[in-house]
């Protein structure tokens, strides 16, 4: 019987290893798998490469992961915002490597990995420092830059509902990066607020098929921290 449910967050994250590339879904707070990020902090893997839309806000979530010294490099679009002081301090101190990627390119590089595409040409970034060292080509009179896929060892994503096969639905804009990250990672781990009975989710409503999800863990809708991690096997 296929059952991808895990008993706890720490159980779901147990094999994330030092040096892993980890995609983390979300656009700011929307769709951010906060419980999985807190679980990764508790799990303790280090020297991580994180792929995310931004570089954390305030002192919680992704910012807390950075502050804990677990991240070697971050690949993102928006590293600096008004409250991105954790990233700013680490980067200025030379303790964190940054690969800056325009948001459309970031999404497409992730999607290309999941789709098995070897790369793509885009006009975004041509003529800037972001194109240095990359192949360029003129197509129909316009210059393009070649961008390579971004693959990951693990993806941490947040969904609204899932069944034991791993089929997922999302809540509105919380969908953002989750579906393509699930496709681009070797192991995708999803937190869900609701566990549905197998067959109860209309196939037309499934956004991420279970084929792309290896583990799911239920988290309370109001949970904000690692208090629920104690039941780890």
Image: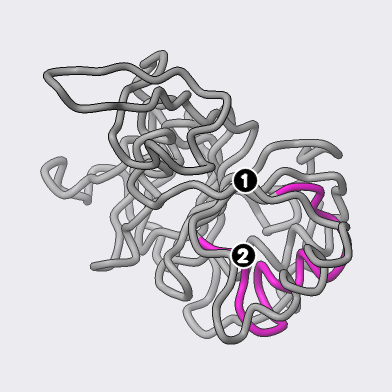
| Disc with the residue nearer the chain's start (2 vs 1) | 2
Residue drawn at (62%, 71%), measured in percent from left and top?
A: 56
Local SS, label 1: strand
Can residue 1 be seen here? The reply is: no
Image coordinates of residue 69 in percent, x first then y, are 88, 61
How crowded pointer 1 is (Cα within 10 Å; few <14, some 14-19, many 20+) is rated as few
Residue drawn at (56%, 50%), measured in percent from left and top?
A: 100
Image coordinates of residue 147 in percent, x first then y, are 43, 27
Local SS, label 2: loop
| Residue 168 falls within the magenta-colored stretch | no
Residue drawn at (19%, 27%), measured in percent from left and top?
A: 142
207 to 96, vertically: above or below: above
Left or right of 50? Residue 182 is left
According to the image, label 2 marks what residue?
55
The one nearer the camera, 160 or 144, is: 144
The one nearer the camera, 21 or 221, is: 21
Tell me the quarter of the picture where residue 14 sits. Answer: top right
- C-alpha span from label 2 to label 1: 11 Å
Left or right of 33? Residue 204 is left
Cβ atoms at labels 2 and 1 below 8 Å apart = no
Q: Which residues are magenta?
A: 54-73
Task: Find residue 99 and name its label.
Answer: 1
Task: Find residue 27 and name its label.
Answer: none
155 to 37, vertically: above or below: above
Residue drawn at (30%, 27%), measured in percent from left and top?
A: 144
Can residue 152 be seen here? The reply is: yes
How crowded pointer 2 is (Cα within 10 Å; few <14, some 14-19, many 20+) is rated as many
Image coordinates of residue 202 in percent, x first then y, are 14, 47
The one nearer the camera, 212 or 66, is: 66
Image coordinates of residue 155 in percent, x first then y, are 56, 43
138 to 14, vertically: above or below: above
């Amino acid at each position: 019987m296929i059952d991808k449910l895990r008993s706890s967050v720490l159980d779901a994250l147990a094999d994330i290893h030092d040096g892993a590339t980890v995609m983390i879904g979300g656009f700011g707070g929307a769709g951010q798998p906060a419980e999985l990020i807190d679980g990764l902090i508790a799990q303790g893997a280090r020297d991580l490469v994180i792929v995310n839309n931004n570089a954390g806000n305030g002192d919680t979530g992704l910012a807390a992961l950075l502050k804990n010294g677990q991240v070697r490099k971050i690949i993102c679009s928006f590293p600096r915002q008004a409250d991105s002081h954790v990233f700013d301090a680490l980067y200025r101190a030379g303790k964190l490597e940054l690969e800056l990627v325009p948001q459309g390119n970031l999404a497409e590089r992730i999607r290309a990995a999941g789709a098995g595409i070897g790369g793509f040409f885009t006009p975004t970034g041509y003529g800037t420092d972001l194109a240095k060292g990359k192949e360029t080509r003129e197509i129909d009179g316009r210059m393009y830059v070649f961008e390579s896929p971004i693959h990951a060892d693990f993806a941490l994503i947040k969904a609204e509902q899932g069944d034991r096969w791993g089929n997922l639905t999302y809540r509105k804009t919380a969908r953002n990066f989750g579906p393509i990250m699930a496709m681009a990672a070797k192991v995708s781990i999803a937190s869900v607020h609701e566990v549905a009975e197998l067959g109860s989710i209309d196939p037309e409503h499934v956004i991420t098929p279970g084929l792309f999800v290896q583990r799911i863990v239920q988290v309370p809708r109001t949970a904000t921290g690692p208090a629920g991690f104690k039941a780890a096997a």
